[in-house]
Image (cartoon, rainbow, N blue to C red):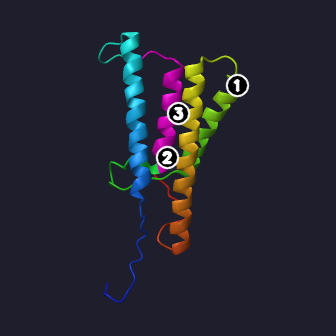
Amino acid sequence: MSDNEPDSTPKIIVDTDWKAEAQAEKQRLAKKAEEAEAKAGGKSGELPQANFQMLVGTLASQAVMGLGAVRDPKTGGVVVDLEAARFAIDLLAVIEDKTKGNLTDEETKEVSQALAELRARFVQVSDAVKTQVAAGVAPPVVDPG
């Protein structure tokens, strides 16, 4: 390929600001999971106790992964799967709606805070992808498979 020919390889330009926020969210969720495990008296190698916090944390982690917080171990590239992220966020919204009045104040705050943060991050990432697609530097669909 000569210097005058444009590179036809799609490139994804990543806004590192949202990546830092995603990493902070991931660490916050991991800390909560550790605290929950400590409260449950879980031993090393055992699965954590199944509870509401773990459910919220699991779905939030799936959404964060879909928003590109985790690199593909094979390619080292960022994988953004907006459909998977939206699905996990929508599931959390269903849980919030269906459990109204049945949660402690702490649980209510946890699910609503997770949803607010994930929705804001989803908007940031989807806007970044749209901008890149419009500029012709990213493929319209990012397929991790």
Residue at 42 percent of width and 64 percent of height: 13
* The label number, if any, that marks residue 98 in the structure image: 1
Q: Nearer the viewer, residue 74 or 66?
A: 66
Q: Earlier in the sequence, mark 2 or mark 1?
A: 2
How packed is label 3: few (under 14 Cα within 10 Å), some, or many (20 or more)? some
Secondary structure category for the residue under label 3: helix
How packed is label 2: few (under 14 Cα within 10 Å), some, or many (20 or more)? many
Residue at 53 percent of width and 33 percent of height: 59
- The three-letter amino acid code for the residue at tag 2 is Gly
Find the magenta span and give its range.
48-67
Residue at 58 percent of width and 37 percent of height: 115
Q: Earlier in the sequence, mark 2 or mark 3?
A: 3
Residue that protrudes farthest toward the bottom in the picture: 4
- Work out whether 66 lies above or below 142: above
- The three-letter amino acid code for the residue at tag 1 is Lys
Residue 38 colored magenta?
no
**Residue 84 visible here:** no
Residue 21 point in image, percent of width and height: 42, 46
Q: CA distance from mark 3 to mark 1?
A: 16 Å
How packed is label 1: few (under 14 Cα within 10 Å), some, or many (20 or more)? few
Residue 52 colored magenta?
yes
Residue occupied by mark 3: 59
- The three-letter amino acid code for the residue at tag 3 is Leu
* The label number, if any, that marks residue 141 in the structure image: none
Residue 101 point in image, percent of width and height: 70, 19
Residue 44 point in image, percent of width and height: 29, 17
- The quarter of the rendered structure image containing the N terminus is bottom left
Residue occupied by mark 2: 66
* Left or right: 23 as drawn, with respect to 44: right
